Image (cartoon, grey):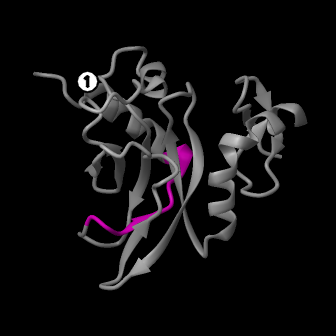
Amino acid sequence: MRKGSCLVCGTLAMKLCSGCKTALYCNRGHQKQDWRSHKEYCVKVQNAKNTFDAILFAADEIEPRLVKIPWEFKEGEWHDLDRSVWFKNPRSFVRNLSVSPTLCFLYDDHFGENGSQRNGCIDVFTGGNPGRPWAGNILALRKGDSDLYDFFDNVDMDEDFLPLVRFFERYGRRG
């Protein structure tokens, strides 16, 4: 059984959403309480033909978690990710930034101008001292087997988490 933090209260949780199989809750009451905000994501994941595992650094949470990102092949054979659940601001500009030869993340490049909430996850895991302030949601993925930006693969939380934290600690620092 998978363990993690309850999406509502942050305590140890072992109750997994039966739909998307990614959201964790400590009890049925918290699962019901969260359904309104969880429903859009859950339905998209259930209906998706293809998904990638990604690490979500949510702006309004303090612990990163694995999520599934629906995707489909587009003409020209590139991965079109459905990022709509995490990037809702109409004034956002979602970009892909390379962390390493194998990792990248998606973030709102306009977070400084569109009022996005500071990213609590990154603040917690960098000890409150990121190399630069980050805001809005951030999704980390592995790069696919291509030199192009639009090919992705599943992350592995055990292997990929620490390199991402180190990146957030250093990126933007001078010297």
Question: What is the residue that sits farthest to the right in this orientation?
Answer: 28
Q: Residue 73: x percent and y percent?
A: 43, 79
Q: Decide: is 71 above or below 159.
A: below
Residue located 55% across and 35% down the image:
64
Residue bounds of the magenta highlight? 149-159
Q: Quadrant of the C terminus?
A: top left
According to the image, label 1 marks what residue? 132
Q: Is residue 69 visible?
A: yes
Q: Residue 166: x percent and y percent?
A: 35, 31
**Residue 155 forms part of the magenta stretch:** yes
Residue located 53% across and 27% down the image:
60
Residue located 12% across and 22% down the image:
174
- Which quadrant of the structure image shows residue 3? top right
Q: Residue 144: x percent and y percent?
A: 37, 68
Is 144 on the left-hand or right-hand side of 6? left
The kind of residue on which mark 1 rests is Arg
